[in-house]
Image (cartoon, helix red, strand yellow):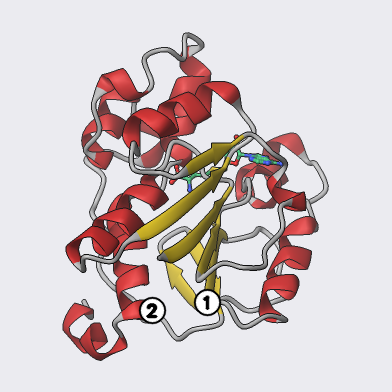
């Protein structure tokens, strides 16, 4: 049984991509999603019914041992350029502690975040658009689906279409600002699909290069 830990699991674009690959390869998996917002865990469970556990614990404190693959997408707000211009919060340095902790163990991992507005203390393994990825396995660039509109102009239906998900996944989130935000935060499933494919199936890597 292949044991996956998905920290800061969100609505679950990451989970969709990883599970798509594992299903294609007929790999039995045990999938643990850690997400601390109730409405978002609900969306996650609608989108990813094959998860084994969705737990509302604090992902910063969740044990990282005993898994075969770990993905983490910590909140990006405090690292983004928007924060530098508008909110001016200090960056949440737990991002860097988490990457260091994951680097000290052998389990393959990927941490995803935005390009920070400051020089990152740990160089990313891969940059794709505004996404930065850190990993202990080599990963190379690939094409990411393009959005129909500029990021700031994407509304709820645009994000649903982009990610290929139905409205019912998030329509219980009545606060429309929050609903749009969780869809913006969602990783396009093709991204985690391509990355797990490279990590578990490195011979096919060359075929995927853009
Ligand atoms: C960038 S989003 C993740 C997106 C996800 N990879 C996807 O594809 O949908 C980060 C998520 O972390 C959650 N979160 C923030 N702090 C958390 C914490 N301490 N423990 C667990 N989840 C947390 C947020 O609610 C948010 O849904």
Dot 2, crowdedness within 10 Å: few (<14), some or many (≥20)?
many
In this picture, residue 7 sits left or right of residue 190:
right
Where on the picture, by quarter, is residue 191? bottom left
- For the residue pair 2 and 168, the one nearer the viewer reads as 2
Quadrant for the N terminus in the image:
bottom left
Q: CA–CA distance between discs 1 and 2?
A: 8 Å
| Quarter of the image where one finds residue 180 | top left
Q: Residue at x 52, y 49 (%)?
A: 32
Residue at x-position 52% and y-position 77% = 108
Residue at image mark 1: 108
Residue 205 quadrant: bottom left
Residue pointed to by mark 2: 199
Q: Position of residue 150 (x, y in %)?
A: 33, 41
Nearer to us in this view, 138 or 38:
38
**SS of the residue at dot 1?**
loop
Taking the image as shown, residue 196 lies to the left or right of residue 105, namely left
For label 1, being within 8 Å of ligand 1 is answered no
Ligand 1 is found in the corner quadrant, namely top right
The image shows residue 177, relative to residue 43, as above or below, that is: above
Asked whether disc 1 touches disc 2, contact meaning CB atoms under 8 Å apart, the reply is: yes
Q: Residue furthest top?
A: 174
Residue at coordinates 35% horizontally, 28% vertically from top-left?
46
Can you give x and y, in whole percent of width and height, for residue 197 in the image?
30, 73
Secondary-structure class at tag 2: helix
Name the outermost residue toward the front.
1
- Residue 120 seen: no
Q: Residue at x 57, y 61 (%)?
A: 115
- The numbered mark, 1 or 2, whose residue comes first in the sequence reads 1
């Amino acid at each position: 049984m292949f044991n996956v830990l998905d920290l800061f699991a969100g609505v679950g674009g990451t989970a969709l991509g990883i599970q798509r690959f594992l299903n294609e390869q007929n790999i039995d998996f045990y999938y643990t999603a850690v997400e601390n917002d109730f409405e978002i865990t609900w969306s996650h469970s609608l989108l990813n019914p094959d998860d084994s556990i969705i737990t509302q614990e604090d992902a910063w404190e969740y044990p990282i041992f005993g898994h075969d693959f770990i993905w983490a997408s910590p909140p990006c707000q405090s690292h983004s350029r928007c924060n530098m211009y508008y909110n001016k919060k200090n960056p949440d340095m737990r991002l860097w502690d988490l990457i260091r902790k994951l680097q000290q163990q052998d389990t393959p991992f990927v941490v995803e975040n935005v390009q920070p507005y400051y020089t990152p203390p740990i160089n990313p393994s891969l940059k794709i658009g505004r996404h930065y990825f850190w990993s202990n396995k080599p990963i190379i660039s690939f094409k990411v689906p393009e959005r129909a509109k500029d990021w700031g102009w994407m509304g709820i239906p645009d994000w649903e279409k982009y990610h290929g998900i139905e409205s019912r996944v998030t329509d219980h989130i009545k606060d429309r600002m929050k609903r749009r935000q969780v869809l913006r935060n969602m990783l396009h499933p093709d991204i985690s699909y391509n990355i797990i494919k490279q990590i578990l199936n490195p011979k096919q890597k060359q075929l995927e290069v853009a």
